[in-house]
Amino acid sequence: MIDLKGKTAVVFGLANKRSIAWAIAQKLDEAGATLAICYQNERLQRDAESLAAELKEAKTFQCDVTSDSDLDRLFATLKDTYSKLDMVVHSVAFAGADSMKNDFIETTREGFLLALNISAYSLIAVARGAAPLMTDGGSIVTLTYYGADKVFPNYNVMGVAKAALESSVRYLAASLGTKNIRVNAISAGAIKTLAARGIGDLQKMMEHASNHAPMKRNVDPAEVGNTAAFLLSPLSAGITGEVTFVDCGYNIMG
């Protein structure tokens, strides 16, 4: 059993009970970690506070990862509150509706920059803020998808953003390795999250995955949570810069 007692984790991207971030937060809570739950804005505050109340030791903090001032304020508050951090969960991604539904060649400059800023650059900004608080080393985990490697209908600019995210994982791992801070990504299979609803034909994607995956089913969010808990824990001390697939084997099939 993973033991994270005495460890503190900050979780970005918890929107509701269907969020992968929530599945991860639950597993970290079960392992004894202290959690700082971050929500984007006042509209999401009630849900974040309601979910945090279900955890044994969790506090909520507002932070928009596209705002440097928000991030500076957050990490200053986390330092005052917890003194240090051990784990970071980055489960943040967004692209405009037009960027997802239109033909990829119609992607606008504005839509491209928006998707890359929120879905990829935010990991760099979060890692930069967290690193000085990881005085005893630490682990950072982000969420990606197979659309970074292969073309999926209606995934479009998000696939490009996820490819940038995965490359950022490797560069951050190299940058932070001497500080004993590890950076990894989980490539989860298709899951019905709030963000995934913006993908056209999501249900068809999930049916195709369950039909073709070796395990003949879709992944459960709790399975992603288990993998995240492992990657965030000392049990994965020698692993960094990697993308770990948790998709019932779908990615291995031709």
Image (tube, rainbow, N blue to C red):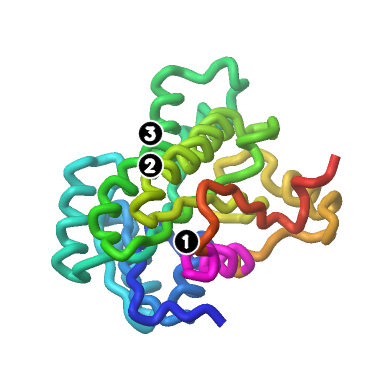
Residue nearer the viewer, 192 or 209: 209
231 in magenta: yes
Q: Nearer the viewer, residue 142 or 193?
A: 142
Q: Provide the residue designation for mark 3.
A: 117
Alpha carbon of mark 3 to alpha carbon of mark 1: how far?
19 Å
Residue denoted by label 1: 21
For the residue carrying disc 2, how many other residues have a C-alpha within 10 Å: few (<14), some (14-19), or many (20+)? few
Residue 210 position, x and y percent, is 80, 54
Q: Position of residue 241 (x, y in %)?
A: 52, 47
Specify the amino acid type for callout 2: Ser
Q: Residues within 10 Å of mark 3 (few under 14, many from 20)?
A: many
Q: Which mark is residue 175?
A: 2
Q: Which residues are magenta?
A: 223-236
Instruction: Work out which quarter of the rendered image holds the N terminus and state it.
Output: bottom right
The 10 Å Cα crowd at callout 1, few under 14, some 14 to 19, many 20 or more, is many
Quadrant in the rendering for residue 38: bottom left
Q: Is 221 part of what is drawn in magenta?
A: no
